[in-house]
Image: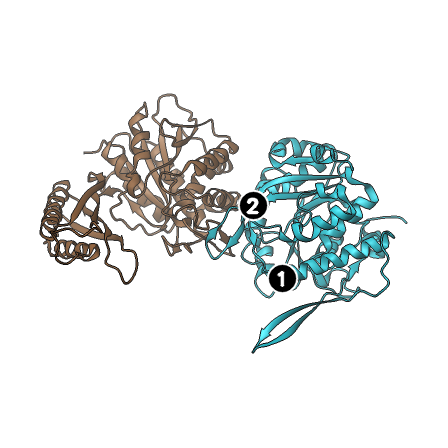
């Protein structure tokens, strides 16, 4: 196992805080960079993300060329607010409308590739309470400065917001430690060096994203790592410590469903690589139980595990971005 | 002066054109908790942001007040101070993360004083955008240890150690737009602590209750006859004490302020309250301690002082109605050192000192134009000829 990767390719965001250097290098390499924010009812946090990124990384330091919001049909004011603060806002269903319609974060990320113009795409979750421009420039630093790096993943000290107003200093990453890390340890020990494979913030070159499939739902982060690893190897990866990220706490049942989707994606990849063979069909329902009036009632949650193909296989995309087969 | 006053309405749109930067400064600094005496982290962020905006000098004074200086064109003109206090009333474990809506920012401390501090840090960029240069050096100071027990220590130290004379000052507060403070009442801020030993002693047949003892102190303060002239009042502002509902309280604390536009009257009321506390302590046979947390002398500019008249003119030009009242803030320290100064509010908002305090975004740009107008007035010399009484 190559364990030197973690030493060579792990950075701290402060190593890229010389923003003038990033601007110069970006201009020298003639790169276009897009920030993409997938949203679903994020009216409380979206404006702050757009404002800070626009101020610091567009107006003051021209690192980002555009901010694109792809929304899954929010019922609050997310789209209106995002538009008001100057982002390019799309509803996911309006992009490539002739394709079958799905709803999920992975769908938004995949469709963002069609509307964004950048050679490099930064994906950030839109619910980051302590958003700071380091979240974007930290991820962009290795991609702009080092030609061998094609995909950068964030990791954090992750406090979880508890209650309305209190914060406790540690926590988070339960699905990572209970599901992903055991799986990686069993099948891809090299990948255990990626400290937080499920972090929702990452950036990469378009040529990487356009050539990999995107699961519609929770499995997108896992599949991305496995697919990029398979196609290009670990050396194109980097990870950056972005310090602290405050995110919403999810209950155990929600984490259970997340784990189901991740396992589903993982097993699909294993099968595709011919690493395992299953005699029986896998089910696509997560079954959890509630105690109602002294009776255990199943709560069945269907997780289809739909995936979008590499977007380069879509004709409209190839035409728009002049990709020749 | 009319020259620059006429330009002020035009400033508003230019200031608004960099709203992202102004709001980013408000949010990035305001989200760092800074309870009084624990402002170190916020001070660092304040300094980082000031340095980012390329002020000519950026440093902390001996008391760790962060200060940025924009050099003026004249070697001989004394500096103009623009100050905002950094500390807040919220402890560090309170959620300080702000939420931005279409036209508002919500979160702990946003009104007092994240907006003021964020605007202060944005001024170098705003001056650049407006193409403004000043004769005087502009000293941008975020002062620490201002509120409550802080007793304005930051600003006191800053002014005590500043080497040169000061031409004039603008104190910036988040709210309310229209606020024009140019006089400070004399004030003594006190706490009375009542402690009762939980161990039974021979002196009490029935154990006294600390909360009820302080209630007696309050009742006696309420009986004091305060004059309308000089205008005087006692504000009972804080109480705390006790352990649980079904147990006699052994400890309780009462916080209050004596305010008057006469220092003599403040002292006289203080002496009356001291007698009340001593008498109650004796009669109830409990330990009552009266502590003075802060003491400010009454000081003022007259309404016809050119700085006040200029500030009113600036506000009227921007369709802001000036509302005046006494202020026990940084202003009082400037005035007590004979430095002409006013306090201005930047925007409107709700829930002033609550965790869900909220400010309107749109009025901020007019509020900033107003502060710049007053700085320009001072730079044009309105304070130069008029010493304070």
- Where is the N terminus of chain A found, in terms of image quarters? top right
The residue that mark 1 highlights is A254
Residue B19 in view here: yes
Chain ID for brown: B
Q: Along the horizontal axis of the image, is A102 left or right of A21?
A: right
- In the depicted view, which residue is nearer to us: A199 or B124? A199
Image position, residue B284 (x, y; %) = 12, 53
* Chain containing mark 1: A
Residue pictured at 40% horizontal, 31% vertical: B138
Q: Earlier in the sequence, mark 2 or mark 1?
A: 2
Residue B187 in view here: no
The residue that mark 2 highlights is A52
User: Alpha carbon of mark 2 to alpha carbon of mark 1: how far?
Assistant: 30 Å
Q: Are marks 2 and 1 on the same chain?
A: yes
Circle 2 — which element? helix
Q: Nearer the viewer, mark 2 or mark 1?
A: 1
- In the depicted view, which residue is nearer to us: A173 or B27? A173
Q: Along the horizontal axis of the image, is A201 left or right of B102?
A: right
* Residue B163: assigned label: none
Chain ID for cyan: A
Image position, residue A220 (x, y; %) = 73, 54
Judge the density around disc 2: few (<14), some (14-19), many (≥20) Cα neighbours within 10 Å. many
Q: Quadrant of residue A24 in the image?
A: top right
Circle 1 — which element? helix
**B174 up-or-down from B65: above or below:** below
Image position, residue A188 (x, y; %) = 78, 45
Q: Are marks 2 and 1 in contact (CB under 8 Å)?
A: no
């Amino acid at each position: 196992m190559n364990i030197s990767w973690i030493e060579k390719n792990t950075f701290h965001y402060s190593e890229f805080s010389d923003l003038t250097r990033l601007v110069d290098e970006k201009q020298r390499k003639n790169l276009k960079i897009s920030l993409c924010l997938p949203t679903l009812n994020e009216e409380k946090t979206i404006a702050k993300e757009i404002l800070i990124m626009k101020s610091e990384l567009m107006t003051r330091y021209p690192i980002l060329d555009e901010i694109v919001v792809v929304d899954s049909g929010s019922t609050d004011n997310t789209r209106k607010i995002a538009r008001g603060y100057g982002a390019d806002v799309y509803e996911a269903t309006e992009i490539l409308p002739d394709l079958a319609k799905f709803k999920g974060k992975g769908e938004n990320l995949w469709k963002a590739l069609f509307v964004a113009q950048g050679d490099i795409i930064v994906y950030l979750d839109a619910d980051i309470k302590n958003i700071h421009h380091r979240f974007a420039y930290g991820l962009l630093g290795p991609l702009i400065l080092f030609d061998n790096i094609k995909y950068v993943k964030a990791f954090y000290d992750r406090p979880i917001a508890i209650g309305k107003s209190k914060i406790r200093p540690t926590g988070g990453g339960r699905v990572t430690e209970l599901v992903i890390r055991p799986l990686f340890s069993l099948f891809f020990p090299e990948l255990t060096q990626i400290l937080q494979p499920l972090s929702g913030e990452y950036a990469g070159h378009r040529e990487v994203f356009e050539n990999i499939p995107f699961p519609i739902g929770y499995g997108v982060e896992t599949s991305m790592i496995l697919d990029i690893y398979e196609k290009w190897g670990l050396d194109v990866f980097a990870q950056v410590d972005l310090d602290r990220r405050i995110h919403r706490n999810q209950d155990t049942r929600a984490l259970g469903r997340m784990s189901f989707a991740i396992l589903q994606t993982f097993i699909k990849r294993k099968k595709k690589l011919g690493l395992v063979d299953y005699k029986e069909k896998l089910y696509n329902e997560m079954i959890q139980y509630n105690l109602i009036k002294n009776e255990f009632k199943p709560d069945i949650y269907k997780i289809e595990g739909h995936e979008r193909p590499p977007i380069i296989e879509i004709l409209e995309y190839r035409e728009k971005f002049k990709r020749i087969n | 002066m009319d020259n620059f006053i006429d330009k002020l309405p035009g400033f508003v749109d230019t200031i608004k054109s960099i709203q992202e930067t102004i709001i980013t400064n408000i949010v990035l600094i305001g989200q760092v908790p800074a309870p009084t005496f624990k402002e170190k982290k916020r001070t660092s962020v304040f300094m980082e942001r000031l340095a980012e905006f390329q002020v000519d000098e950026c440093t902390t004074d001996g008391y760790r007040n962060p200060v940025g200086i924009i050099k003026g064109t004249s070697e001989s003109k004394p500096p103009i101070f623009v100050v905002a206090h950094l500390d807040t009333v919220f402890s560090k474990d309170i959620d300080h993360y702000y939420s931005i809506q279409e036209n508002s920012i919500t979160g702990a401390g946003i009104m007092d004083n994240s907006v003021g501090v964020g605007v202060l840090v944005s001024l170098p960029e705003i001056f650049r955008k407006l193409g403004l240069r000043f004769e005087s050096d502009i000293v941008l100071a975020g002062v620490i240890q201002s509120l409550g027990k802080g007793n304005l220590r930051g600003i006191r130290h800053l002014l005590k150690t500043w080497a040169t004379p000061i031409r004039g000052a603008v104190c910036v507060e988040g709210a309310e737009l229209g606020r024009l403070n140019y006089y400070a009442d004399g004030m003594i801020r006190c706490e009375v602590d009542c402690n009762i030993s939980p161990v039974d002693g021979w002196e009490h047949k029935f154990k006294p209750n600390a909360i009820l003892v302080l209630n007696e102190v309050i009742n006696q303060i309420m009986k004091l006859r305060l004059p309308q002239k000089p205008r005087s009042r006692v504000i009972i502002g804080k109480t705390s004490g006790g352990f649980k509902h079904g147990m006699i309280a052994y400890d309780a604390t009462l916080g209050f302020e004596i305010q008057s536009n006469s220092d003599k009257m403040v002292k006289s009321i203080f002496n009356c309250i001291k007698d009340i506390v001593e008498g109650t302590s004796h009669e109830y046979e409990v330990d009552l301690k009266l502590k003075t947390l802060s003491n400010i002398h009454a000081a003022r500019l007259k309404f016809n002082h050119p700085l006040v008249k200029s500030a009113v003119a600036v506000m009227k030009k921007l369709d802001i109605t000036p509302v005046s009242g006494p202020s026990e803030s940084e202003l009082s320290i400037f005035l007590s050192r004979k430095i002409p100064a006013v306090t201005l509010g930047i925007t409107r908002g709700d829930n002033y000192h609550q965790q869900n305090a909220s400010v309107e975004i749109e009025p901020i740009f007019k509020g900033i134009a107003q502060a710049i107008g007053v700085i320009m007035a001072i730079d044009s010399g309105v304070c130069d000829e008029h010493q304070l009484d």
